[in-house]
Amino acid sequence: MRFSIIIPAHNEEENIAKVIKALEENVFLGHEIVVVDDHSTDQTRDIVEGLTMQYKNKIRIVVNTKKPGFTNALMTGFAHAQTDYLLPVMADLCDDPDTINKMFEKIQEGYDIVCGSRYIKGGRKLGGPRLKSFFSRFAGVSLHSLIGIPTHDISNSFKMYKKEILDKIKICSQGFEISVEIPLKAYFLGYKITEIPTTWTDRKVGRSKFKVFRQGPLYGRLYLWALWKRIFLC
């Protein structure tokens, strides 16, 4: 195994088998898949357990025993990963599995974080609420310009990490903003970050767990913290 794909899943019975199938058909490098059952009340767990013997790569399901939510589910997956490289993949088919091979190539070049970016040449964002898209693009492009972080898409959760980074960072997030917190804190600690283009596609079935007005203030605090940190360091 070369890296671990972590899939937080809450009530994704309509998507989870499709995500795993897409990963196994498009990711050519050795990997394991760790699905985190985040307090699902549907058949998500049963479906994954039924797939564990179907594919040559190791597929496991673990349970988030902490409070439900993206951060706790993701941290549960990280803790159970058996490799030194970690990649969150959403359970709703939004992330492009073909990007993953290229991400690991960049990691091998010496980078600590490789960000999938929708907002650079070759990247695309297909569908999704316009307000969410506006804030996502604004945050990514403006932070790249204002603090110099080498990604234009800070909010995208589709990032590959060296596991050692997590030992150096205190995670304070409560939800999806963990995908912003980790790279920002890693950047200010001097870790090497890069980005490659990827295509993001809005989910076709099921309901999104991301709530703009609930998550917005949490992202906003990290945005302001990063600006303050840049001013303080200068």
Image: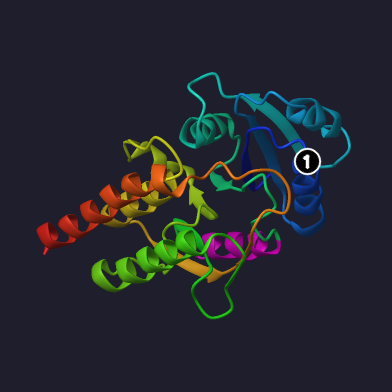
Q: Is 192 placed left or right of 2 in the picture?
A: left
Please tell me which residue is depicted at 55% across the width and 61% down the height of the picture.
108
Task: Spot the residue most to the bottom.
Answer: 121
Q: Nearer the viewer, residue 30 or 17?
A: 17
20 or 165, which lies in front?
20
In the image, residue 175 sits, relative to residue 184, either above or below, namely above
Q: Relative to the observer, which residue lies in front, 73 or 106?
A: 73
Can residue 84 be seen here? The reply is yes
Q: Could you tell me which quadrant the N terminus lies in?
A: top right
Q: Residue furthest top?
A: 65
Identify the image quadrant of the C terminus: bottom left
Q: Residue at x 75, y 48 (%)?
A: 19
Q: Is residue 15 magenta?
A: no
**Residue 53 % position (x, y):** 87, 32
Read off the magenta span: 98-110
Residue 187: image location, x then y, percent: 31, 57
Q: Residue at x 46, y 61 (%)?
A: 131
Residue 52 placement, left or right of 145 = right
Question: Which image quadrant is residue 166 in?
Answer: top left
Q: Label 1 neighbourhood size at 10 Å, few (<14), some (14-19), many (20+)? A: some
State whether residue 110 appears in this view. Answer: no
Q: Amino acid at mark 1?
A: Glu
Q: Position of residue 122 (x, y in %)?
A: 59, 78
Q: Judging from the image, what secondary structure is the residue with disc 1 in?
A: loop
Q: Nearer the viewer, residue 142 or 56?
A: 142
Rendering coords of residue 169 (x, y %): 33, 40
Residue drawn at the location 50% of the way across and 32% of the way down = 69
What's the magenta bit mostly, secondary-structure-wise?
Answer: helix
Q: Is residue 147 above or below residue 67?
A: below
Which color scheme does this rendered protein use? rainbow
Residue 107 inside the magenta-drawn segment:
yes
Residue tagged 1? 14
